[in-house]
Image (spheres, rainbow, N blue to C red):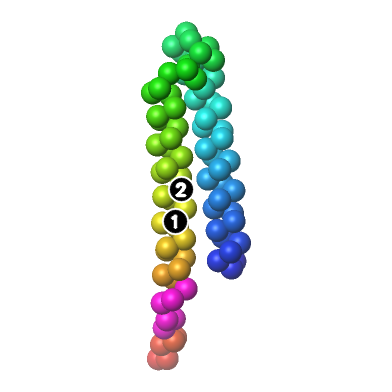
Amino acid sequence: MDKQKQLTMMRFWLFGTFVIIFAAATIYLGGALGLGLAIVKTIQFWLAFVIAAVLSVVMYFVYKAILDRQETQPKEPPVKE
């Protein structure tokens, strides 16, 4: 698989995972704390998701750097015995 395809797939999965976690956390935490959707009015709720979003972006760029490093490293020729 080429680098651009891998990066596109990584963006898709990071965004999808973030959206699913956001929805699940909103519903389950709101229900568990008895706040319902009023949980979105708390600063801690938004702070947690800002941190999660930043970590997702960082993970994307770390993955991109790993792919770049793999691309620039010379491939060793097979060893003949």
**Magenta region includes residue 1:** no
Residue contact between numbered discs 1 and 2, judged by CB atoms under 8 Å: yes
**Three-letter amino acid code at disc 1?**
Phe
Does the rendering let one see residue 31?
A: no
Residue 27: image quadrant is top right
Direction from residue 8 to residue 52 in the image, left or right? left
- Please name the residue shown 56% across and 60% down the image: 6
The Cα atoms of the two marked residues, 1 and 2, are separated by 6 Å
Does the rendering let one see residue 4?
A: yes
- x%, y% of residue 46? 44, 27
Which residue is under mark 1? 61
| Residue most extreme to the top | 34
Which residue is under mark 2? 57
- x%, y% of residue 53? 46, 40
Label number found at residue 3: none
| Residue most extreme to the bottom | 81
Q: 73 and 58: which one is in front?
A: 58
Describe the element under mark 1 as helix, strand or loop.
helix
**Magenta segment:** 71-76
**Three-letter amino acid code at disc 2?**
Val
Q: 25 and 46: which one is in front?
A: 46
Is the residue 61 above or below the residue 68 in the image?
Answer: above
- x%, y% of residue 54? 42, 42
Is the residue 49 above or below the residue 70 in the image?
Answer: above
Circle 2 Cα neighbour tier, 10 Å, few/some/many (<14 / 14–19 / ≥20): some
Describe the element under mark 2 as helix, strand or loop.
helix
- Please name the residue shown 54% across and 39% down the image: 17
**Magenta region includes residue 75:** yes
- Please name the residue shown 47% across and 8% down the image: 34
Residue 5: image quadrant is bottom right
